[in-house]
Amino acid sequence: MGPRPGHVLGALGGAALGCFAWGLVEANLFTVRRLEVPVLPPGGRTLRILHVSDLHLTSKQHFKLDFIRSLASLRPDLVVTTGDNIADADAIFPLMAAWNSLRFTPGVFVFGSNDYYAPAFKNPVKYILDGRSRPAEDPKELPWRTLRDKMTGVGWKDLTHRRETLEVNGYKIAFRGTDDAHLGRDDYSAVAGPADPTADLNIGVTHAPYLRLLDGMTADGMDLILAGHTHGGQVCVPGYGALVTNCDLDPARAKGLSSHTHGGHTSALHVSAGVGTSPFAPYRFACRPEVTLLTLVPRPVGFATDEPVS
């Protein structure tokens, strides 16, 4: 005699409840990923970039603040933040206090939707079916100008539709960035154009890795593109990966290092799985919250920019 339907449903319900409970735990298992990226000129020294994204910080998230403070021990040469820093207005002061030990480290940033507007409840089933969330109809604006001024006040460069050039660890790095594509605020034409041939490295920075931006930056010759927004899928299938990316990027590239080819050029692409979640969906499954320490290393002799990055 087989198992009774009630027993089967009970077992499935118990498994679902266990997965949900684990997701609440996993959302606080903050992790530092370490990757090497071969994009520097041959023969040079390494360069360490701390890529941070999607903190979604509230003022009472003390464990997350402790994690942010601990990042100074990684001793990066450069900090890049790709948006969605806060989830409420009261988070700005504790966030900047947590960054305090890295205030003398060069940094650049762009903003995402949750820097501009407070998060709102989204139907998780509809999100999975649609593959992306929709902006709220009447969003509550956050004090993003204050956040911007605090970040630029420690010397970090705002790349919102701007180009900047920094000297970092002996390298001339040319940056370009855009505003958030998920809100339709992006205008790549404001920074478009060929890569700086005098720079050792050209980096594109944006919050949401929509293909229109990846195509534009890659065709213009960016060596490396950094983005966030996807949360790595946030709720993933073990052994398979992300189901959605919250944009038009394919799920296989929802997080980590990959490449993007367009217009006869290939760029290294790193999409951060991010540190936080929306306060309305405070769980992750098979997708730990993370920052990434990218160690840039010289390209192998003979490496061409039309070759995919592994």
Image: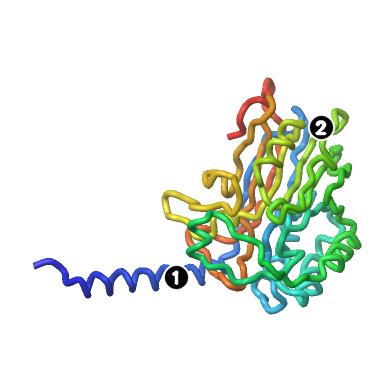
Looking at the image, the residue that sits furthest to the top is: 302
Which element type, helix, strand or loop, lies under badge 2? loop
- Mark 2, other Cα within 10 Å: few <14 / some 14–19 / many ≥20: many
Residue 147, horizontal then vertical, whole percent: 83, 66
Is 296 in front, or is 251? 251
Examine the rendered structure and indicate whether residue 38 appears above or below residue 17. above
Examine the rendered structure and indicate whether residue 160 appears above or below residue 45. below
Q: Which residue is mark 2?
A: 195
Q: Residue at x 57, y 56 (%)?
A: 132
Q: Is residue 70 left or right of residue 7?
A: right
- Mark 1, other Cα within 10 Å: few <14 / some 14–19 / many ≥20: some
Q: Amino acid at mark 2?
A: Ala
In the rendered view of the protein, which quadrant contains the C terminus? top right
Q: Is residue 166 visible?
A: no
Q: Residue at x 78, y 52 (%)?
A: 179
Q: Which mark is residue 20?
A: 1
Q: Is residue 138 visible?
A: yes
In the rendered view of the protein, which quadrant contains the N terminus? bottom left
Q: Amino acid at mark 1?
A: Phe
Q: Which mark is residue 62?
A: none
Residue 137, horizontal then vertical, whole percent: 68, 67
**Could you give the CA–CA distance between mark 2 and mark 1, rounded to whole angstroms?**
46 Å
Residue 300, horizontal then vertical, whole percent: 67, 26
Examine the rendered structure and indicate whether residue 28 appears above or below residue 158. below
